[in-house]
Amino acid sequence: MRIDIITVLPQLLESPFAASIMQRAQDKGLAAIHVHNLRDYADNKHRNVDDYQYGGGAGMVMSVEPISKAIEKLKAERTYDEIIYMTPDGAVLDQAMCNQLSLKQNIIILCGHYKGVDQRIRDLYITKEISIGSYVLSGGELAAAIVVDAVVRLIPGVLNDETSALTDSFQDNLLAPPVYTRPPEFMGMKVPEVLLSGNPKDVAAWREAQAYERTKDRRPDLLED
């Protein structure tokens, strides 16, 4: 999978992809993450990529020309399955969306900033708009990093144990059950006996019951879905 991220603040995306699972995915050649500085596509001496909004009002708007140039350059080099815009008014990211995106080959992610992008960019180029929640960030960079992390980890071969992602919270509309490791007793609290029984069938049944109870208690809306 190749992911191209267009941003006015590329430095915000240096760390998230330079360690742990994201770095391993790139080292294995399973994911290629490229960050593009939108200012490189500005044709003015100050490298400005925003302007005042028509009709007045607070906040600057990201300009059409540099974004269009950046997207057109990338599209001339390869075909993209999705061109995503990170925006608070997009569809809220969930596990099902991440699963779908993990099947794509080439993706562009445009990070919003200031008051957002000129609507014509959204109308001309954007195929999917994504929000990570009902709140506003200073820009789309952190949101883009979340999307990339959530998607890339699902690519076969990225995780050492490929079954791990299948048992994550939300994969089956349930939260993950409690997990334990050594020691078997800590401060008087013992690991449930069933997990020490060595009986896979009993363990699986316990985990399913615990996942259901935890979901009913903490996220009953998932059961409604």
Image (spheres, rainbow, N blue to C red):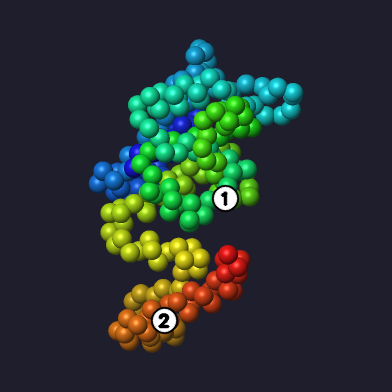
Image quadrant of residue 166? bottom left
Mark 1–mark 2 contact, CB under 8 Å?
no
Residue position for label 1: 92
The secondary element bearing badge 1 is classed as: strand
Residue 14 showing in the rendered view: no
Q: Spatial distance from mark 1 to mark 2, Cα to Cα?
A: 32 Å
* Residue drawn at 34 percent across, 79 percent down: 183
The secondary element bearing badge 2 is classed as: helix
Q: Position of residue 115 (x, y in %)?
A: 64, 32
In the image, residue 103 above or below residue 169? above
Q: Position of residue 28 (x, y in %)?
A: 25, 46
Q: Position of residue 191 (x, y in %)?
A: 40, 82
**Residue kind at label 2, given as amino acid type:** Ala
- Closest to the observer, 169 or 142: 169
**Residue kind at label 1, given as amino acid type:** Val
The quarter of the picture where the C terminus appears is bottom right
Residue position for label 2: 205
